[in-house]
Image (tube, grey):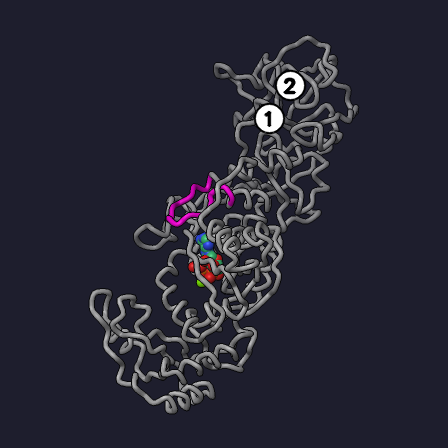
């Protein structure tokens, strides 16, 4: 992606603000709520924010938006940091909205003193009833005109824990007839007797999102506060609070969130999948989480390239999962090491190859010479893929069949002379002869074959479990379907091959290695793997690049 790209609308805003001298440099933030693991949607916001700061020499804060004590946890905080680092970004500061609780309380007191906030005793149902509808104005609460002193005393008592959850709230005093429903005296503080993962039991009142977010932006002197489109109606309240509090004027800008096919993206739904055991955890390779993609073998570059390619716009759409896979293949095709593995093995015996002889054959590690070579042991008995043999070959069948010839990748040309079946009628052994002068790289045989197949030496191969993944949902957009989104889970999203044979060099694989198993797809070692039991995940299937590879 080297072509000159036009600016997206946020880059235009930033460039104008820098050019006009409104700001000398930009500060933005990525503000996750630590109530779940990050998903691919978050990576769009991460790439956008960190990308802008990189491009324009600004800085990006990581701010945990931890104002809801009930759903948040330090496990999530740690996973979020790990995922951002893995994506290749480093924040300038690590902040927590909960660090601002004292300041936010003071801001609320300022509003009360200005007659712009009041304590309301109505229940949440009563507040909802008086709120009106988008077409009907709301009505004032009977508590709206409490004196400033009474409000100050009551708010302080709320803080001291004199009331139960829901007994009182603090509301901004704006306008119950406002056309924007969010401006009809929004709740800014509520009582919640709950333990907070950072502040412990210090607080029993917690600021609402709208009161915490913009004020946190302002405290950090955020110049461009970027969020997703559903926050457009909140912008008016964001601006109102900043204006009335007379604090640093951060500004909010909205872009379209990423939606992707065959998955769900809301953390609430992802949590259900985890808690109800539909997946093995947040990092299950079928999950759309960053940790799931990482475990499946995705590279940070592929995700960054994907975010770049989908761009930043103001209209929501549904991006096809295959675009992400395209970006992945593009990266892995260049960077993944080549290896051979036979997933569905059948024995091939070279009858004219000397018993006990072993040759070490050279094979390229990458798509070309740049990643060097490795040696692969070759001997009389090999494993090949069952599907590479056909007893009665179809037309244009270029692989093995009785009487047919094929090249064994990086080795010799063999000709199938006969085969043996077991009592069930399945092929048990294929017997071939090889042509000693046809060795790859020094072929003087003059024999032309159209097909090349992969293999592993039966004597030297290791065995491994292979996990093949498919999309987690059958429906393109499960969240938009009627009824429960979980009714659309793909029952065949995981297939396990218990015993595949892999070439011995794969015994040295580490979690960070990415492989192309020739003709079979891209694979990586799974974290459940041990020396006693190797496990590989299929990262993604191959695009049909084999025709090119095979000619080598
Ligand atoms: P969820 O609804 O899944 O809980 P959220 O938006 O509440 O998601 P946050 O942790 O609050 O999750 O999100 C942190 C940041 O990531 C926010 O700025 C949010 O706008 C952005 N974000 C979340 N989901 C997406 C998405 N699908 N596409 C782009 N940005 C997203
Ligand atoms: Mg949120």
Task: State which quadrant residue 205 falls in.
Answer: bottom left
Task: State which quadrant residue 236 falls in.
Answer: bottom left
> Which residue in the structure is indicated by mark 2?
407
Q: Residue at x 55, y 77 (%)?
A: 199
Compared with 111, 178 (above or below) is above
Which one is nearer the viewer's eye here, 112 or 86?
112
Whole-percent x, y for residue 531 in the image = 71, 47
Q: Earlier in the sequence, mark 1 or mark 2?
A: 2
Q: Residue at x 54, y 65 (%)?
A: 63
Residue 144 placement, left or right of 51: left
Whole-percent x, y for residue 492 in the image = 45, 43
User: In this picture, which residue range is highlighted in magenta?
Assistant: 308-322
> Which residue in the structure is indicated by mark 1?
428
Residue 418 makes an appearance in the image: yes
Which one is nearer the viewer's eye here, 178 or 207?
178
Q: Give the residue furthest to the front.
A: 20
- Report the number of discs: 2
Q: Residue at x 51, y 46 (%)?
A: 307
């Amino acid at each position: 992606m080297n072509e000159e790209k036009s600016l997206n609308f946020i880059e235009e805003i930033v460039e104008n603000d820098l050019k006009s001298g409104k700001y000398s440099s930009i500060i933005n933030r990525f503000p996750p709520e630590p109530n779940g693991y990050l998903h691919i949607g978050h990576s769009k916001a991460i790439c956008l924010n960190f990308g802008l700061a990189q491009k324009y020499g600004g800085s990006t804060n990581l701010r945990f938006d931890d104002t809801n004590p009930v759903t948040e946890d330090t496990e999530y905080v740690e996973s979020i940091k790990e995922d951002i680092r893995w994506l290749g970004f480093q924040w300038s500061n690590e902040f927590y909205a909960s660090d601002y609780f004292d300041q936010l309380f003071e801001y609320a007191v300022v509003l009360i003193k200005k007659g712009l906030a009041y304590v309301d005793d109505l229940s949440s149902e009563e507040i909802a009833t008086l709120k009106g509808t988008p077409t009907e104005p709301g009505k004032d609460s009977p508590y709206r005109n409490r004196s400033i002193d009474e409000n100050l005393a009551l708010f302080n008592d709320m803080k001291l824990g004199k009331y139960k959850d829901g007994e009182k709230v603090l509301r901004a005093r704006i306008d119950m007839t406002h056309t924007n429903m969010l401006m009809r005296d929004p709740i800014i503080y509520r009582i919640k007797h709950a333990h907070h993962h950072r502040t412990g039991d210090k607080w029993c009142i917690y600021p609402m999102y709208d009161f915490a977010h913009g004020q946190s932006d302002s405290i950090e002197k955020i110049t461009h506060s970027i969020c997703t489109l559903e926050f457009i109606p909140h912008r008016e309240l964001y601006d109102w609070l900043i204006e009335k509090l007379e604090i640093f004027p951060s500004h909010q800008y909205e872009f379209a969130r990423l939606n992707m096919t065959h998955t769900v993206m809301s953390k609430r739904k992802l949590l259900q999948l985890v808690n109800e055991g539909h997946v093995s955890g947040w990092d299950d390779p079928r999950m759309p989480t960053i940790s799931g993609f990482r475990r499946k073998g995705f590279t940070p570059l592929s995700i960054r390239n994907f975010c770049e390619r989908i761009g930043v716009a103001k209209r929501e759409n549904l991006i096809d999962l295959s675009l992400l896979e395209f970006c992945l293949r593009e990266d892995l095709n260049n960077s993944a090491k080549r290896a051979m593995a036979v997933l569905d093995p059948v024995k091939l015996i070279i009858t004219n190859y000397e018993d006990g002889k072993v040759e070490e054959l050279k094979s390229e590690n990458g798509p070309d010479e740049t990643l060097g070579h490795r040696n692969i042991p070759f001997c009389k008995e090999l494993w090949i893929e069952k599907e590479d043999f056909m007893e009665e070959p179809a037309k244009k069948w270029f692989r093995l069949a009785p009487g047919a010839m094929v090249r064994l990748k990086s080795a010799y040309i063999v000709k199938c002379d006969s085969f043996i079946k077991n009592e069930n009628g399945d092929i048990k052994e294929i017997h071939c002869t090889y042509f000693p002068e046809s060795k790859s790289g020094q072929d003087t045989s003059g024999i032309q074959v159209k097909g090349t197949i992969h293999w592993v030496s039966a004597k030297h191969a290791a065995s491994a479990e292979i996990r093949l993944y498919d999309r987690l949902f059958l429906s393109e957009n499960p969240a938009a379907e009627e009824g429960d989104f979980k009714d659309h889970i793909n029952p065949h999203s995981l297939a396990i091959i218990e015993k595949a044979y892999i070439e011995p060099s794969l015994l040295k694989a580490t979690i960070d290695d990415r492989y192309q198993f020739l003709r079979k797809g891209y694979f990586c070692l799974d974290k459940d793997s041990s020396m006693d039991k190797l496990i590989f995940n299929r990262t993604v299937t191959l695009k049909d690049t084999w025709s090119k590879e095979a000619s080598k």
